[in-house]
Image (spheres, grey):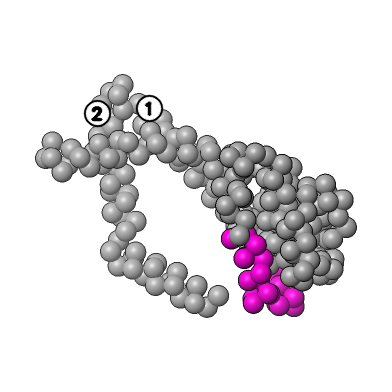
Amino acid sequence: MNNVAKNYAGQLEGFKRIDAAGQKQAEEAAVLAWLKKQGAAGKPALAAHAQLIKHLDASKATRERDLFVGQFNNTSAVSAAIGLYRLSIERTKPDAEREVGYQQRDLPTLEGGLKQMDRRYVAKMDQQLQTYWLDQYVALPAAQRNNDVLNKWLGGRDANAVKAMVSKLSGTELGSLDARLKWFKADRAAFEASTDPAIQRVVDRAPAVPAGTGRLQEEPGRVRVPGCQPVAAHHLRQRDGL
């Protein structure tokens, strides 16, 4: 974690030194000014830009919550449960219709990741990380503390609620390689009948995840293409001295 922090700090210092934010803001202002001069031809791109700003503002409002919940979901046992259950869902589809990362060609990589977990997984450390991120979540203002599944599992917003949830999750069998490989081959019905606490939590949260994830990925994507096209056109005109 220290190395990651140092890397981020170095990148931020580099961006500050070259005034990357200022350069991008000036470029954005120039493109918007150019679009406004294009009349009707510029309106689709201006609308796309406004929509991107709307998405950005929405993401800022939940940035801390999304960070804390995301990091909790990235702890080893919980992350393994998420990936394994998702694989069982994707396996119900024809291979060509599966999400990227869960197709037949990806299975050796997924299995390798489950095996590599043995090299870095320490149960006590995993529990400490879970505790840290849940502590951050319960300390959020009430308006941001709105992950319904996580709230149901916590049953409160204090240290005792966090301790109880982490204690429950510690009963997972996913710390064992044999167990992970067993679940690697399991079907969706087996997951949904499981009493493993980490798997139960993932099954509980699953109905909300695909729709939410899709919205976050798809909506900005719809406006990003019309938003990027005028940037390219503006650069070409500048290059050609127009």
Q: What span is in magenta?
A: 109-132
Question: Which residue is label 2 attached to?
Answer: 37
Residue at 49 percent of width and 39 percent of height? 220
The main secondary structure of the magenta stretch is helix
- What type is the residue that disc 2 sits on? Lys
- What type is the residue that disc 1 sits on? Pro
Q: Earlier in the sequence, mark 1 or mark 2?
A: 2
Q: Going by the picture, which residue comes out furthest to the left?
A: 241
24 over 218 or under it: above or below: below
Assess disc 1: are there few (<14), some (14-19) or many (≥20) residues with their C-alpha within 10 Å of its C-alpha.
some
Name the residue nearer the viewer: 137 or 113: 113
* Kind of element beneath mark 1: helix
Q: In the figure, is residue 47 to the left or right of 115? A: left
Residue 63 image offset from top left, x and y in percent: 57, 54
Q: In the figure, is residue 223 to the left or right of 90? A: left
Q: Quadrant of the N terminus?
A: bottom right
Q: Quadrant of residue 35?
A: top left
58 over 166 or under it: above or below: above
Residue 39 image offset from top left, x and y in percent: 28, 23
Residue at 81 percent of width and 67 percent of height? 173
219 over 164 or under it: above or below: above
Name the residue nearer the viewer: 52 or 169: 169
Q: Is residue 120 magenta?
A: yes
Residue at 39 percent of width and 68 percent of height? 11
Q: Is residue 26 visible?
A: yes
Picture mark count: 2
Residue at 45 percent of width and 41 percent of height? 53
Q: Is residue 167 magenta?
A: no
146 over 97 or under it: above or below: below
Question: Which residue is label 1 attached to?
Answer: 44
Q: CA distance from mark 1 to mark 2?
A: 13 Å
